Amino acid sequence: MPRPRKRRRVCQLPENSLFGPLNAKHLTGERTIMTIDEFETIRLIDIEAMTQEECAQRMNVARTTVQRIYNDARRKVAVSLVEGNILKIEGGDYKLCDGSVQLHGCGRCRGRRSGQN
């Protein structure tokens, strides 16, 4: 029996969850689904300029897990851009951070309770 998946700590949900080409012929096209935890790794590593180690600590997972999540997320962004797919951000195994500095060390949480898994 496999070990249960650990829920990743996420401190910010996306403001927008749907991205894609503006030309109408693609609006009904294929969709690429990115999970909330994949979005969080992109945010922490690329926007917050964290290392994978720092990101892993923030998300409460192993560095190798962050590396895999980040690689999956970057591939999904690339596929969406190159193939013109709509990118939808939803789902995943995550726990929304409560914003407490002592518990999570992130104090800048902008998480919203709606949409939490």
Image (cartoon, rainbow, N blue to C red):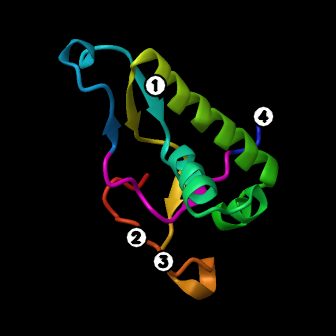
The amino acid type, in three-letter code, at marker 1 is: Ser
List the residue tagged with mark 1. Answer: 80
The amino acid type, in three-letter code, at marker 4 is: Met
Q: Give the range drawn in magenta.
A: 5-16
Q: Which of marks 4 and 3 is nearer the N terminus?
A: 4
Q: In this rendering, would 40 be left or right of 17?
A: right
Q: Distance between the residues labelled 2 and 1?
A: 26 Å
The amino acid type, in three-letter code, at marker 2 is: Arg
Q: Earlier in the sequence, mark 2 or mark 1?
A: 1
- Tell me the crowding category of disc 2: few under 14, some 14 to 19, or many 20 or more residues within 10 angstroms, Cα based: some
Residue toward you, 15 or 81: 81
Q: Do the residues labelled 2 and 1 touch (CB within 8 Å)?
A: no
| Residue at the extreme left of the image, as rendered | 24
Find out whether residue 20 is within the magenta segment.
no
Residue depicted at x 74% and y 56%: 52
Q: In this rendering, would 52 be left or right of 94?
A: right
Q: Distance between the residues labelled 3 and 1?
A: 29 Å
List the residue tagged with mark 4. Answer: 1
In this view, 1 is above or below 63: above
Q: Could you say which disc has been placed on residue 108 in the image?
A: 3
List the residue tagged with mark 2. Answer: 110
Find out whether residue 6 is within the magenta segment.
yes
For the residue labelled by badge 4, is the local secondary structure a helix, a strand or a loop? loop
Q: Nearer the viewer, mark 4 or mark 2?
A: 2
Which of the 4 image quarters holds residue 116? bottom left
